[in-house]
Amino acid sequence: MRTAIAAFALIAALAAVPAAYAASQPTQDTTAAAEKMFTTMDTNKDGVLTKEEFAAHHMADDFAKADKNGDGKVTREEYLGHASGMQMQ
Ligand SMILES: [Ca+2]
Ligand SMILES: [Ca+2]
């Protein structure tokens, strides 16, 4: 009985570590990387990404997915939302 409890505690502890790790570090890294990518892709520095700017980085297929409201521009918020969505898949 005691062994079963110890084993359960061990499994619970092992399961908690990756969950806690995933909740902190990678999310920040992903956001920082996405921010950097957005800045890199925004070649004319107007604060939004156009389909042409996506295409210039060989990501034309991602444009429609990232442009959530379909106004033909991808804002920083839309891009970060798109990037974090990709991380979750
Ligand atoms: Ca731009
Ligand atoms: Ca948009």
Image (cartoon, helix red, strand yellow):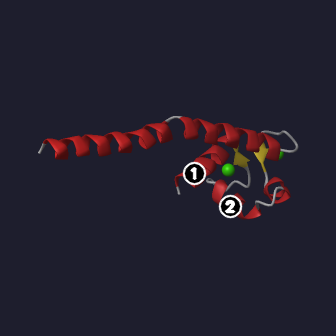
Q: Residue at x 82, y 60 (%)?
A: 55
The count of marks equals: 2
Q: Is mark 1 within 8 Å of ligand 2?
A: no
Q: CB atoms at circles 2 and 1 under 8 Å apart? A: no
Mark 2: which secondary structure? Answer: helix
Q: Residue at x 18, y 47 (%)?
A: 4
**What is the spatial separation of the Cα atoms under label 2 and label 1, in whole angstroms?**
18 Å
The residue pinned by badge 1 equals 87
Going by the numbered disc 2, the residue's amino acid type is Ala
Direction left: furthest residue: 1
Q: Residues within 10 Å of mark 2 (few under 14, many from 20)?
A: some
Query: Dot 1 lies on which element?
Result: helix
Viewer-side residue, 27 vs 38: 27
Q: Is residue 78 left or right of residue 45?
A: left
Q: Please tell me whether residue 53 is drawn above or below residue 5 in the rendered image.
A: below
> Measured from the top left, where is residue 8 in percent x and y?
24, 45
Residues packed near mark 1 inside 10 Å, few (<14), some (14 to 19) or many (20 plus):
few
Question: How far across and how far down the image is residue 70, in percent?
Answer: 66, 57
Name the N-terminal-most of marks 2 and 1: 2
Residue 85's x, y, as percent? 56, 52
Q: 17 and 79: which one is in front?
A: 17
What quarter of the picture does the N terminus occupy?
top left
Q: Quadrant of residue 66?
A: bottom right
Q: Residue at x 67, y 36 (%)?
A: 32
Image quadrant in which you'd find residue 12: top left
Which numbered circle lies on residue 36? none
Where 55 sits versus 33, above or below? below
- Identify which residue is drawn at 68% across, 61% down: 64
Please give the label number shown on residue 64. 2
Q: Please, which residue is most extreme toward the bottom here?
A: 61
